[in-house]
């Protein structure tokens, strides 16, 4: 996961980029004094050049979907860089280029039945857990009760033959 900014002094440009799945946030705002960016909105709100006003459309989206769509945030004038995206600006903060550098693609393969794909998923999951169980000391896990952590814990119990505690 990453979010970064690179300033090229010679070219007079700034490149902002965010990881492919959007794990690390990157927020930005254009103000009269230039471009502001940070990994948390509260850092941007400390700037006197940024008004603290709600984005009413984003608020409606959040109340409906529990998420703000596209590049919106709950604050007017503050945007989030979308996952797998970049923003290229000049030193004055004007956008030169923006876009996505990666797109998730699903290639459909209908030549195999569902049992094949279920077995393939099981193999990949077990292999992944097996690799992470390699240790010179006892291994434990935290379980949130969600589907992902429960699946990992059950797979680890199956692979070690130790079962799950009652």
Image (cartoon, helix red, strand yellow):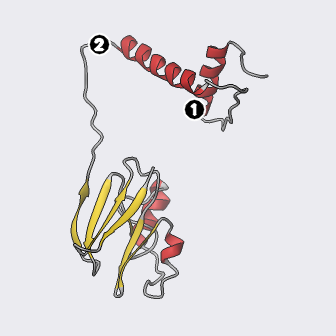
Q: In this view, does 89 lie to the left or right of 135?
A: left
Total labels drawn: 2
Position in image of residue 77 (x %, y %): 38, 76
State whether residue 30 is above or below residue 133.
below
Packing grade of label 2 (10 A; few <14, some 14-19, many >=20) is: few
Dot 1 falls on a residue whose secondary structure is: helix
The quarter of the displayed image where residue 91 is located = bottom left
Position in image of residue 132 (x %, y %): 58, 27
Position in image of residue 9 (x %, y %): 28, 74
Front-most of residues 114 and 89: 89
Dot 2 falls on a residue whose secondary structure is: loop
State how far apart marks 1 and 2 are (Cα).
26 Å
Q: Residue 45 carries which label?
A: none
Q: Which residue is drawn at 45% across and 49% down?
A: 1
Front-most of residues 19 and 7: 7
Q: In this view, does 61 lie to the left or right of 110?
A: right
Position in image of residue 71 (x %, y %): 35, 63
Q: Residue at x 26, y 51 (%)?
A: 101
Of all residues, the one furthest to the right in this rendering is: 166
The answer to whether mark 1 and mark 2 are in CB contact below 8 A is no
Q: Which residue is drawn at 30% across and 59% down?
A: 86
Q: Which mark is residue 147?
A: 1
Q: Which residue is drawn at 49% across and 60% down?
A: 63
Nearest to N terminus: mark 1 or mark 2: 2
The quarter of the displayed image where residue 141 is located = top right
State whether residue 127 is above or below residue 82.
above
Packing grade of label 1 (10 A; few <14, some 14-19, many >=20) is: few
- Image quarter in which the C terminus is found: top right
| Residue on which the image places disc 2 | 112
């Amino acid at each position: 996961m990453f979010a970064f900014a690179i300033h090229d002094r010679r070219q007079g440009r700034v490149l902002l980029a965010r990881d492919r799945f959007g794990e690390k946030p990157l927020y930005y705002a254009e103000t009269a004094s230039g471009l502001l960016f940070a990994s948390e909105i509260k850092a941007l709100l400390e700037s006197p050049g940024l008004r603290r006003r709600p984005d009413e459309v984003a608020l409606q989206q959040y109340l409906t979907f529990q998420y703000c769509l596209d590049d919106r945030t709950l604050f007017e004038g503050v945007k989030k860089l979308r996952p797998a995206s970049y923003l290229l600006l000049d030193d004055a903060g004007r956008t030169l280029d923006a876009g996505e550098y990666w797109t998730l693609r699903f290639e459909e393969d209908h030549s195999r039945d569902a049992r094949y794909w279920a077995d393939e998923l099981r193999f990949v999951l077990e292999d992944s857990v097996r690799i992470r169980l390699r240790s010179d000391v006892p291994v434990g896990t935290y379980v949130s009760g969600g589907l992902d952590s429960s699946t990992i814990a059950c797979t680890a119990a199956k692979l070690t033959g130790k079962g799950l505690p009652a």
